[in-house]
Image: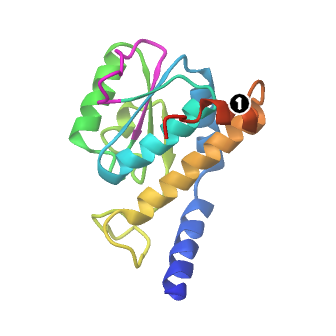
Amino acid sequence: MKQKINTIAKEIQEVLGQVNETEVIELAEGIQQAPRVFIAGTGRSGLVGKMFGMRLMHSGYKIFIVGETNTPSIESDDLLLLISGSGGTTSLLNYANKAKEIDAKVALVTTNKQSAIGSQSNYIVRVPAATKKRLPQEPNTIQPLGSQFDQSAHLLLDAIVVYLLDTYPANRSVDSLNQKHSNLE
């Protein structure tokens, strides 16, 4: 078991070591500048998006998860962040097209910058991880399906939260984050 854990950790470290820092900083700055951030993904990528949205909310950002019953309409200047390994998930492409129609910005975390969603995006962060498709250019992994992408995206997005907290610390202390943490537990 220890070997499997170490192999997975090494895989993720190798993937994240190849991410373009400029792309990540541009996305973080886009989040900082947006009046509101809407987040969507499907399957496990959607769960990663929900975790990211929760941390951004704790950090004082106005965050909405697409598809939740209390999510309002997206407006111009808002940011729609999509997480899609392939960059071609049909429902997410529809969201991107709708966001562009009303002049909202679109961000994509993906393995494929040249994807259909990528062509609609203002910000793209490429995570060079394996997806469920196991394309020839993707790295090897001992993990099933898109686990390597989802785990890498999760850690990358957590790093963005840390960057935002460090870069824009006003009113964002551990105590202030704890105050926004759920108390109905």
Please give the name of the residue rendered at 62% of the width and 42% of the height, measured from the top-left corner: 160
Whether residue 84 is visible here, answered yes or no, is no
Segment colored magenta: 66-82
Residue 87, image x, y percentages: 34, 46
Circle 1 residue = 176
Nearer to the camera, 85 or 74: 74
SS at mark 1? Answer: helix
Is 116 included in the stretch rendered in magenta?
no
Disc 1 crowd, CA 10 A, few/some/many (<14, 14-19, 20+): few
Q: Is residue 7 left or right of residue 97?
A: right
Q: Looking at numbered disc 1 in the image, what kind of residue is underneath it?
A: Ser
Is 76 included in the stretch rendered in magenta?
yes
- Which residue, as the protein is rendered here, is positioned at the far left? 90
Q: Is residue 185 left or right of residue 103?
A: right
Please give the name of the residue rendered at 40% of the width and 79% of the height, measured from the top-left corner: 142
Residue 101, image x, y percentages: 31, 16
Q: Is residue 174 left or right of residue 144?
A: right
Q: Is residue 24 above or below residue 29?
A: below
Please give the name of the residue rendered at 54% of the width and 16% of the height, measured from the top-left corner: 35
Please give the name of the residue rendered at 54% of the width and 64% of the height, measured from the top-left corner: 15
Residue 156, image x, y percentages: 57, 51
